[in-house]
Amino acid sequence: MNLIPIAKPYLTNAEADEASRVVLSGWVAQGPKVKEFEEKFAEYTGARYAVAISNCTAALHLSMIVSEIGAGDEVICPSMSYIATANSIRYTGATPVFAEVDPVNFNLDPADAESKITSRTKAIMIAHQIGMPADIDAFKEICARHNIKLIEDAACASGSSYKGKKIGSHSELVCFSFHPRKVITTGEGGMITTSNEKLRDRLKLLRQHAMASSSIDRHNTSSALSEDHVELGYNYRMTDIQAAVGIVQLSRLDEIVMERRNIAANFIRNLSDIKWLMMPEEKEGFFTNYQSFAVRVHNDSPVSRDELMLRLGEKGISTRRGVMTAHRETAYKDLYSKLSLPVSESASDNSLMLPIFVPMLKDDIGKIIERVRGIFRET
């Protein structure tokens, strides 16, 4: 039985050719291709600057640091998010304060987030969950009123838009992932967009051990440079090999997003009449890349979420559980043993991801639809 995978990267000979050119050039570490990728990503998102990073978790960590967040501080974020969201806060010694999510789009609930603000709150971190934009304007207004920072975990949101502007152009610090499960990939890799020049400069410094002179600076001078490391820095660099792949991927990002949206529309059109399933909802002004396609199983469904996943697997269709809740993971549950987030917990426990990737065979799309419908017909 051929298994339809949950996801797979869309990589072609073009990416292989560009990576090969970099390998043969002799410059494989952070260099001119990273600079080119940064410039093109900034142009794509509408941000003034983009800073390439080794991965999105590192990007979030650096965003915490340049926001002057540290021990004793609090950052409000969703628990219903991949654990890297909360981990990046803990790396600084700060405390993640978990707030509830919207039960339909799984994004942080503005009202509940605001209710968690205390004198120790330094920032709110929103996550554009599985590619669906959060309500950025609502959070910008809350953060401005309380004089705290807004940081966007846009790991899943390359190519998504909010109110006519690409994600990456709305806030001072927006962090992206290029993991293979994302819409475009560099294998591993991340990016931070900002329109603040001082933040751009410090991010570039910190990602390279806080070395005052860059690799390109040292390469392009005949003078003897005395390297100075001006503060505690990190090795969070992207390679030119990854950047070369990213440049090709970025060139067809809009094409990939439109194809993913077509697949999602097909799912919604053909599954929305199943009364026990809740489909994704895209509000006016919100434009999702459908990095994942999540459906939620109603509590009164004759087929539970887990049973649906099991039976789809038996029929050759991979699925994944809904987005995790960090406060119930082993690394967190002792710290948050008294925390109850019923909306997040129910959304996580009753949702699942169906396969979505580009290119996807029409027969496979039809098979997924028919087998989901068949399981509910059999009950």
Image (cartoon, grey):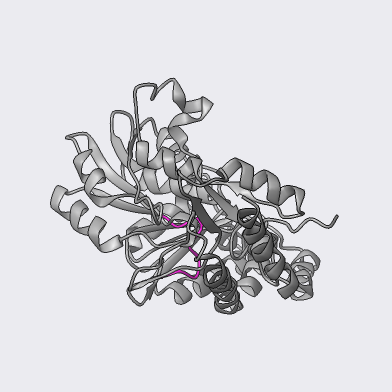
Instruction: Name which residue lies at 62% across and 57% down.
Output: 377
Looking at the image, residue 225 sits to the left or right of residue 287; the answer is right
In the rendered image, the quadrant that contains the N terminus is: bottom right
- Front-most of residues 8 and 62: 8
Measured along the vertical axis of the image, is residue 177 above or below residue 358?
Answer: above
Image coordinates for residue 155, horizontal then vertical, percent? 50, 55
Residue most extreme to the right:
1
- Front-most of residues 114 and 269: 269
Instruction: Name which residue lies at 50% across and 66% down.
Output: 273
Instruction: Name which residue lies at 42% across and 33% down.
Output: 90
Looking at the image, residue 333 sits to the left or right of residue 103; the answer is right
Looking at the image, residue 251 sits to the left or right of residue 62; the answer is right
Image coordinates for residue 150, horizontal then vertical, percent? 29, 52
Magenta stretch prevailing secondary structure: loop
Q: What is the quadrant of residue 367 in the picture?
A: bottom right
Looking at the image, residue 229 sits to the left or right of residue 362; the answer is left
- Front-most of residues 377 and 192: 377
Image coordinates for residue 327, horizontal then vertical, percent? 43, 31
Measured along the vertical axis of the image, is residue 98 above or below residue 184?
Answer: above
Measured along the vertical axis of the image, is residue 91 above or below residue 18?
Answer: above
Q: Is residue 188 visible?
A: no
Instruction: Name which residue lies at 67% across and 70% down.
Output: 358
Q: From which residue to which does the magenta span run?
A: 153-161
Measured along the vertical axis of the image, is residue 279 above or below residue 12?
Answer: above
Residue 160 magenta? yes
Image coordinates for residue 110, horizontal then vertical, percent? 25, 51
Q: Is residue 223 visible?
A: yes
Residue most extreme to the left:
145
Residue 104 magenta? no
Q: What is the quadrant of residue 292 in the picture?
A: bottom right
